[in-house]
Each structure stands twice: as structure tokens, then as C-alpha cells.
């Protein structure tokens, strides 16, 4: 087991490995980007994510996308509390979803799925071998999952 990737107790336990400030450099359709993700406790029952994507590419150079996301308990239709997220970005997009199974990617993966306008999507977090994590966004297809974005985060 990766040492730094230890889930905490209780409903918010899966979020424990993500707490802190993380940075990734990646390529994107807009050009190279740097993404900073900052996960912090927000009281006892929530984790707040502040994310900033800084585009360094030619066409979109200098453009910044920001996201605010809350992770916390959500009362499902059957009365059971499930870990959920609610995300809002400065380009007007929003999404929400619930904790899901991501063990097809990694046995210690933390996965959230979301029903989007274009169909089912998921974001998956899993540990690297040292002191960081991978983050991937995928959309569901008839044949499985289609990778849209993947970043490798390290402590910022």
C-alpha cells in the first residue's frame, strides 16, 4: 500500500489522501496547461476544492479556468447518505455526482461518476508510486471508458 494514500475514517474518509495543494503540468487541446488543485477541509463534513487551470499555449495563452467544488454527504433517493460532489466553473459549466467504483483503474482508486448532458462521465484519482496521484476524466461509451483528460499531480 502506498503510504501517503491512506483513507481516513467516516464518510469523508475517501477524501483524506487528496487533502493539500497539488500541481500538474499537462498538454491539452488548448496547449500546455498548469493545473493547481487545492483540497481543504471545510468544517467537519465537507472538503472544498479550488482548482485553477493556467493555459500556456499559443492560441489560448494567458487564459485561466477556475473551478470550485464541494465534496460532502448527500441524501440519496433511498434515504442513504452517499459521498457526493458539486462543481462549478468560471466558464459556466456545472456538474455533480456520487462516489463510485474505480477499481478497474487501481485498487485504491477514488472515483466519482456524474450524469452529464452528453452521458455518463467519471473522475478517478489513484496514487502514484511516490508522493502524488493521478487524476483522469472519462466518458462512458458502448465499449467502455473513453479517456478525456489525465494529469499527474505532485505536492505544490
Image (tube, rainbow, N blue to C red):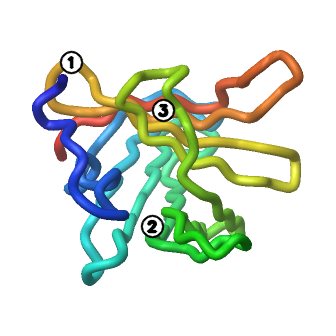
User: What label sits on residue 32 in the rendered view?
Assistant: 3
Which element carries disc 2, helix, strand or loop?
strand
For marks 1 and 3 on the same chain, the one whose residue lies earlier in the sequence: 3
Q: Nearer the viewer, residue 9 or 139?
A: 9
The answer to whether 71 is drawn above or below residue 5 in the figure is below
The residue where tag 1 is placed is 129
Residue at 85 percent of width and 45 percent of height: 119
Crowding at dot 3, Cα within 10 Å, few <14 / some 14-19 / many 20+, comes out as some
Q: Residue 31: x and y, percent? A: 56, 32
Residue drawn at the location 58% of the way across and 32% of the way down: 149
- Sequence-wise, the earlier of marks 2 and 1 is 2
Q: Determine the CA span between mark 2 and mark 1.
A: 25 Å
Of tags 2 and 3, the one toward the viewer is: 2
- Answer few, some or many: residues within 10 Å of disc 2's Cα (few below 14, many 20 plus, some between 14 and 19): many
Residue denoted by label 2: 71
Closer-to-camera residue (62/142): 142
Q: Position of residue 100 (x, y in %)?
A: 57, 45
The single residue placed furthest to the left in the displayed view is 3
Amino acid at each position: 500500500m502506498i503510504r501517503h494514500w491512506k483513507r481516513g475514517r467516516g464518510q469523508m474518509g475517501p477524501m483524506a489522501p487528496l487533502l493539500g495543494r497539488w500541481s500538474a503540468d499537462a498538454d491539452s487541446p488548448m496547449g500546455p496547461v498548469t493545473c493547481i488543485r487545492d483540497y481543504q477541509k471545510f468544517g467537519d463534513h465537507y472538503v472544498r476544492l479550488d482548482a485553477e487551470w493556467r493555459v500556456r499555449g499559443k492560441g489560448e495563452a494567458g487564459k485561466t479556468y477556475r473551478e470550485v467544488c464541494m465534496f460532502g454527504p448527500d441524501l440519496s433517493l433511498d434515504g442513504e447518505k452517499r459521498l457526493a460532489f458539486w462543481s462549478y466553473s468560471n466558464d459556466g459549466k456545472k456538474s455533480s455526482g456520487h462516489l463510485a467504483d474505480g477499481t478497474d483503474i487501481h485498487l485504491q482508486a477514488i472515483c466519482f461518476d456524474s450524469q452529464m448532458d452528453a452521458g455518463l462521465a467519471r473522475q478517478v484519482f489513484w496514487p502514484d508510486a511516490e508522493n502524488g496521484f493521478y487524476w483522469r476524466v472519462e466518458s462512458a461509451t458502448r465499449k467502455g471508458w473513453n479517456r478525456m483528460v489525465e494529469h499527474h499531480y505532485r505536492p505544490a
